Image (cartoon, grey):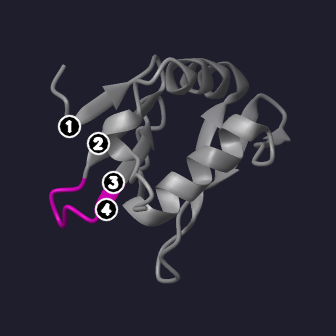
């Protein structure tokens, strides 16, 4: 897998072909969705909140809904499962998302 994509069993993060300032986050099992477009700045803040436990999915039966997008013109929700979310967080903790996260400038 290239450095431009991180895939866990359900959640995929990839650089957007539209702009280097955006990533696309999608659930591979949701064939009805092309994913959620997210600015890298917002994605970086989102990941900090997710890893600290401040950002959590809304559970709806077997589904986990994660508010991740920051474009007002599009749905901000990623539909996934709790299992996929937990695997995604584990892989993020291991540094597998570091290429997508903007570092603060000193």
Which residue is denoted by mark 4 in the rendering?
22
State the separation of the CA atoms marked 2 and 1. Answer: 6 Å
Q: Quadrant of the N terminus?
A: top left
Q: Secondary structure at mark 3?
A: strand
Q: Position of residue 75 (x, y in %)?
A: 54, 68
Which residue is denoted by mark 3 in the rendering?
23
Q: Residue furthest front?
A: 106
Which residue is denoted by mark 2 in the rendering?
14
Q: Which one is earlier in the sequence, the residue at label 1 or at label 4?
A: 1
Circles 3, 4 touching at the beta carbon (< 8 Å): yes
State the separation of the CA atoms marked 2 and 3. Answer: 6 Å
Q: Is residue 9 visible?
A: yes
Q: Quadrant of residue 83?
A: top right
Residue in view at x 75 percent, y 39 percent: 52
* Circle number at residue 4: 1
Residue in view at x 44 percent, y 20 percent: 8
């Amino acid at each position: 897998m290239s450095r431009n994509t991180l895939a866990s069993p359900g959640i995929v993060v990839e650089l957007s072909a539209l702009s280097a300032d955006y990533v696309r986050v999608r659930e591979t099992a949701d064939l009805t969705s092309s994913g959620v477009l997210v600015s890298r700045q917002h994605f970086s803040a989102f990941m900090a909140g997710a890893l600290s436990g401040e950002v959590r999915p809304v559970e709806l039966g077997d589904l986990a809904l994660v508010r991740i997008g920051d474009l007002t013109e599009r749905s901000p929700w990623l539909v996934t499962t709790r299992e996929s979310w937990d695997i995604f967080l584990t892989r993020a903790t291991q540094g597998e998302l570091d290429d997508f996260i903007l570092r603060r400038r000193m």
